[in-house]
Image (cartoon, grey):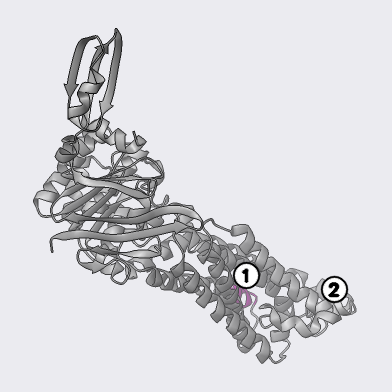
């Protein structure tokens, strides 16, 4: 199992490096740009805060763009949420199906490892890859705060990164289940799902009739502006997220263990 | 343990489509068993069921005295499998692939793999994406043999290999079999069965047609008859009571006649084509 875990981590290495440096680097660049835009931010914050539901959706009615924390929550929070969701979807969607899509299944599964153990190892490798993505991005964001000489709001920052990790794991679990029943890589479906879930959260925050259903989406409990504004996390949203994650993992096991593997 | 592979009443369907139907045969310890049949006959379905890639509906498979479903992982420790496609992870080097196969078995196979790579002329520094089919096949042979398994299962192993490497491959099998291994060889190449197999199982349309030694298969009642009858050249396989062969001759002008045993190729083609 250790050999397969190391192999899977090596397989994910390139994707992890590219996505964490791009998303984290973009976040860092945005943080560093803040000092140059600080003066104009005050005017922007005023005009944005009067945009009603749209301002609520992006948290600009509760947080001020004129502060680095507010700027981070509204701008970098969005970039990180979208980037993280897409990364989790990309890695998870191909995790199991890549063996059949790349015709490597007959090599891998002729080695002494049961399918159940293979699913476990791949799920663990996927989880660690997502965790490392969050760590690299988190370090780059903290670096931005330090370079600008600003205090890091640790409690909110760690809550945000933690919830982003859970949100990424939930998206990854759904895509992992898709991967378990697919003979071909369904990258488009995974990316589409991540984008749909982000848009669903955005719409649920803008459209009043959807407000009651906001907790269904994983972006609801990982929303940066809500966390940095000090709002309490919705226990219902987190519970739904945990349930979806658990069901998706069980479905991945059942689906992969029961079906025939293509050559 | 007399039988290394024991398959009883194996039945597998792909939805409404036929896979294999009621397959029963066994492979004895220390023999090289040929597994023949045209495309779609069910050879790969049988092999893939043995290795746990497919879930079958009925029947049982015992390999090395272990249940193929319940003791799947233990069986794979003692099996060296070479699939027909021989595909690996494109970003890896040959050395990494061979190492991964050994590490997954928790074995240090360096000595054996180095010897195999030398004999098969495998360049371990190359990336998998740079390899031709023949070279991928050679890597697959190394992965299947480096842990010195008790049972080899080869699915069309020589396609893509040059004649020199084909000879080397069979000489390696011979060495491992002499050392106590058993081999199931699925192939389309009749000469491989003739030259290297002790027994042969012939599949057709998902069913097992026969299992016998190569020698017995050619010692059948069928005879190849070549003759010039009433000025017409005839060449056909005669099956049936040899005493009644005179019915073919009486009342005709026979200017030449030759009655001989059919070649093994003809016997196999008879099963392939149902003639």
Tell me which numbered mark, 2 or 1, is placed earlier along the sequence: 2
Residue highlighted by disc 2: A44
For the C terminus of chain B, the image quarter is top left
Label 2, secondary structure: give it: helix
Q: Nearer the viewer, residue A92 or A105?
A: A105
- Compared to residue B118, the image places residue B150 above or below, namely below
Q: In the displayed orientation, state which residue is furthest to the left.
A: B178
The x, y position of residue B45, in whole percent, is 38, 53
The x, y position of residue A74, in whole percent, is 74, 76
Q: Nearer the viewer, residue A97 or B174?
A: B174
Q: Nearer the viewer, residue A74 or B186?
A: B186
Relative to residue A198, is residue A105 drawn left or right? left
Magenta region includes residue A48: no
Same chain, marks 2 and 1? Answer: yes
Residue at position x 13%, y 45% in the image = B174
Chain identity of mark 1: A
For the N terminus of chain B, the image quarter is bottom left
Q: Nearer the viewer, residue A126 or B206?
A: B206
Chain identity of mark 2: A
- Compared to residue A240, the image places residue A6 above or below, namely above
What range of the chain is rendered magenta? A141-148
Residue at position x 38%, y 60% in the image = B53
Relative to residue A24, is residue B184 drawn left or right? left
The x, y position of residue A118, in whole percent, is 40, 68
Residue highlighted by disc 1: A85
The x, y position of residue A6, in whole percent, is 37, 66
Q: Is residue B152 visible?
A: yes
């Amino acid at each position: 199992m250790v050999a397969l875990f190391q192999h899977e981590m090596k397989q994910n290495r390139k994707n992890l490096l590219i996505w964490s440096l791009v998303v984290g680097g973009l976040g860092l660049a945005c943080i560093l740009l803040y000092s140059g835009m600080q003066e104009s931010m005050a005017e922007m914050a005023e005009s944005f805060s009067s945009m009603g539901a749209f301002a609520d959706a992006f948290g600009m009615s509760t947080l001020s763009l004129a502060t680095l924390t507010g700027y981070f929550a509204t701008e970098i929070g969005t970039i990180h949420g979208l980037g993280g969701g897409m990364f989790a979807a990309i890695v998870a969607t191909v995790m199991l199906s890549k063996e059949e899509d790349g015709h490597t299944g007959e090599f891998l599964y002729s080695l002494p490892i049961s399918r159940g153990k293979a699913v476990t190892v791949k799920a663990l490798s996927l989880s660690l890859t997502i965790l490392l993505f969050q760590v690299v991005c988190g370090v780059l964001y903290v670096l931005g705060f330090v370079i600008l000489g600003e205090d890091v709001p640790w409690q909110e920052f760690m809550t945000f990164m933690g919830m982003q990790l859970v949100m990424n794991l939930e998206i990854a679990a759904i895509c992992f289940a898709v991967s378990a029943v697919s003979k071909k890589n369904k990258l488009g479906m995974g990316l589409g799902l991540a984008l749909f879930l982000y848009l669903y959260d955005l719409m649920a925050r803008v459209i009043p009739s959807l407000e009651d259903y906001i907790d269904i989406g994983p972006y609801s409990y990982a929303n940066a502006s809500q966390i940095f504004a000090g709002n309490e996390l919705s226990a219902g949203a987190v519970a739904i997220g945990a349930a979806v994650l658990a069901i998706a993992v069980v479905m991945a096991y059942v689906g992969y263990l029961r079906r025939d593997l293509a050559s | 343990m007399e039988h290394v592979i024991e398959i009883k009443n194996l039945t597998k369907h792909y939805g409404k489509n036929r896979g294999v139907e009621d397959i029963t045969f066994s492979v004895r310890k220390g023999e090289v068993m040929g597994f023949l049949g045209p495309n779609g006959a069910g050879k790969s379905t049988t092999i893939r069921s043995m290795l746990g890639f497919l879930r079958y509906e009925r029947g049982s498979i015992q390999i090395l005295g272990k249940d193929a479903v319940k003791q799947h992982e233990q069986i794979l420790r003692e099996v060296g499998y070479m699939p027909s496609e021989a595909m690996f992870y494109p970003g890896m080097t040959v050395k990494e692939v061979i190492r991964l196969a050994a590490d997954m078995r928790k074995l240090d196979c360096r000595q054996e793999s180095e010897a195999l790579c030398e004999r098969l002329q495998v360049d371990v520094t190359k990336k998998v994406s740079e390899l031709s089919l023949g070279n991928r096949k050679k890597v697959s042979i190394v992965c299947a043999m480096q842990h010195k398994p008790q049972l080899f299962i080869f699915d069309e192993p020589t396609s893509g290999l040059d004649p020199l490497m084909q000879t080397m491959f069979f000489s390696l099998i011979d060495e491992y079999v002499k050392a106590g291994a058993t081999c199931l060889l699925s192939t389309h190449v009749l000469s491989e069965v003739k030259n290297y197999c002790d027994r042969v199982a012939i599949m057709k349309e998902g069913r097992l047609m026969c299992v016998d030694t190569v020698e017995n298969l050619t010692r059948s009642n069928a005879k190849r008859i070549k003759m010039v009858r009433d000025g017409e050249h005839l060449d056909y396989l005669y099956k049936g009571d040899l005493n009644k062969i005179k019915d073919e001759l009486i009342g005709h002008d026979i200017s030449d006649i030759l009655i001989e045993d059919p070649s093994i190729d003809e016997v196999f083609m008879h099963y392939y084509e149902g003639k």
